[in-house]
Image (cartoon, helix red, strand yellow):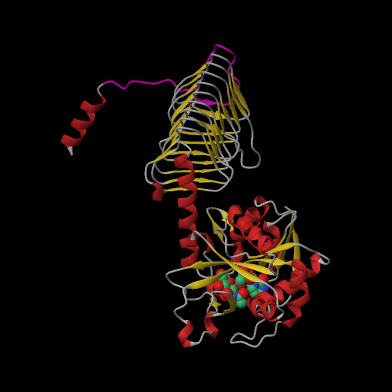
Amino acid sequence: MSAAALVLAAGEGTRMKSHLPKVAHRILGVSMVELVVDAVRSAGVNRVVVVVGHRAEVVRGLLPGETCVLQEQQLGTGHAVMTGIRALEGLTGSLLVLSGDTPLLTPDTLRRLISAREEAGAAVALLTAHVREPGGYGRILRDAVGAVTGIVEDRDLAPEQRDIDEVNTGTYCFDAAALAAHIHKLTPENAQREYYLTDMIAHLRAGGLGVVAMPTEDPGETIGVNTRVQLAEASKVLQRRINRRHMLDGVTITDPDLAWVAPGVTLGRDVVLEPMTFLYGSTSVGDRAVIGPNSRLTNTEVGAGAVIDSAVCVSARVGEEATVGPMAYLRPGAVLGRGAKVGTYVEVKKSTVGEGSKVPHLSYIGDATIGARANVGAGSITCNFDGTRKHPTFIGEGAFIGSDTMLVAPVRVGEDAVTGAGSVITRDVPDGALGLERSEQRAIEGYTERKKHAADDD
Ligand code: UD1
Ligand code: CA
């Protein structure tokens, strides 16, 4: 498809009452403007221009590689388009115009809008929606035969127009040449003293050009986010849409209201998501894995058949059939081999836990490499930081780390080596050896009896 798109994202979004520009607010971890640009790209649109203005550097930062045009003063959506089309000079054919605050549009709807305009040979096709609460949106005016004659903004409505329930979604497909030829006709004569893009409808009609409207099949798709209440509503709609897709693809979600799965997440077949599970970023989960309850995974790769219960995992890799939690924290660079176990109150950072190895209870493992089939006893800790620098720990295959061992890095415990419980290991333990660092235990005979007599004498 040879369509282009203009995404309007220069407004402040006063009604958000935020330090962030509105379009930078996130839904399931992804900013609204990114969601819009992703939908446009997925619809097959190759030329995209984003109009930025208020805190432009923040919005640009969210869109590396995209063409952004600066609208220095935000004088309205019409003015934003006047600014943006300068970057598209000489463009012919279809030009989508979308708002950066309408984040739920699907590529399918955008493609249908483009086809609607092209098939009708119209100067513009606008996407409308019939909604129960039209307040805040511009209303679609139609004449006696149902043809669209214009759009009236909420603030400019006459009393008898208030009940019109067909609203402007702020999503249009223009004939680029017709738009360029008529856009200078916009004037700021309205309640807000702004250049309204919506006035283009009446101007194009007056120029004898065709205007068509395409009502959306799913009003949830066209929510425009102006307030944090609408941000939460939009999040809910996206959550449901994503969860539904995964369920139809073979994922069990125990309570779909209590599982939040970001758009970029992939889930295998027969995955189970228990309540209060949050999967963000580029997380991927292999077949049959069970995640949750109470787990948050960000940019984490989980192998088939793994089980993660009450854990937080960030940029980690969990091997097939591995188990994590309850109450575990996998930090960036944690890599668990096949069948490995990271158990209760265990934190792992930038470390490899080898195939079948276990760190079952109360441990900190940082900057360590643990070979296969090793066991790290309860309460053991890699002392990886000397106050200035981080140092590595190596634990060989089949090693057994006694409970409460302090491994003072840099240090190496050899293959099949053992450390005695409570040892502070500061020197390497050779393969197959026992490393023991412990003062001799003494027994002071008759101690309790003597203490009792001393108390009686008082
Ligand atoms: C707009 C429409 C309204 C429609 C609604 C749908 C107009 C005049 N009104 O109203 O008919 O029902 O969207 O959600 O178009 N922007 C700029 N530069 C500006 C002003 C705005 O880039 O100078 C951007 C904003 O960042 C935003 C988008 O345009 O992403 C829409 O602006 P907003 O102020 O939210 O318009 P609404 O009042 O919602
Ligand atoms: Ca809006």
User: Image point 65% across, 76% down: which residue?
Assistant: 201
Query: Quadrant location of ligand 1?
Result: bottom right
Image x and y of residue 220, in percent: 48, 60
User: Is residue 443 rendered magenta in the image?
Assistant: yes
Q: How many marks?
A: 0
Magenta-colored segment: predominant secondary structure: loop
Residue stretch rendered in magenta on the structure: 423-445
Image x and y of residue 251, in percent: 45, 37
Whether 400 is drawn above or below 90: the answer is above
User: Image point 46% across, 62% down: which residue?
Assistant: 233
Image x and y of residue 170, in percent: 60, 69
User: Is residue 167 rendered magenta in the image?
Assistant: no
The furthest residue to the right: 90
The furthest residue to the left: 456
Residue 373 visible to the viewer: yes
Q: Quadrant of the C terminus?
A: top left
Q: Nearer the viewer, residue 117 or 244?
A: 117
User: Image point 55% across, 25% down: which residue?
Assistant: 337
Q: Nearer the viewer, residue 372 or 230?
A: 230
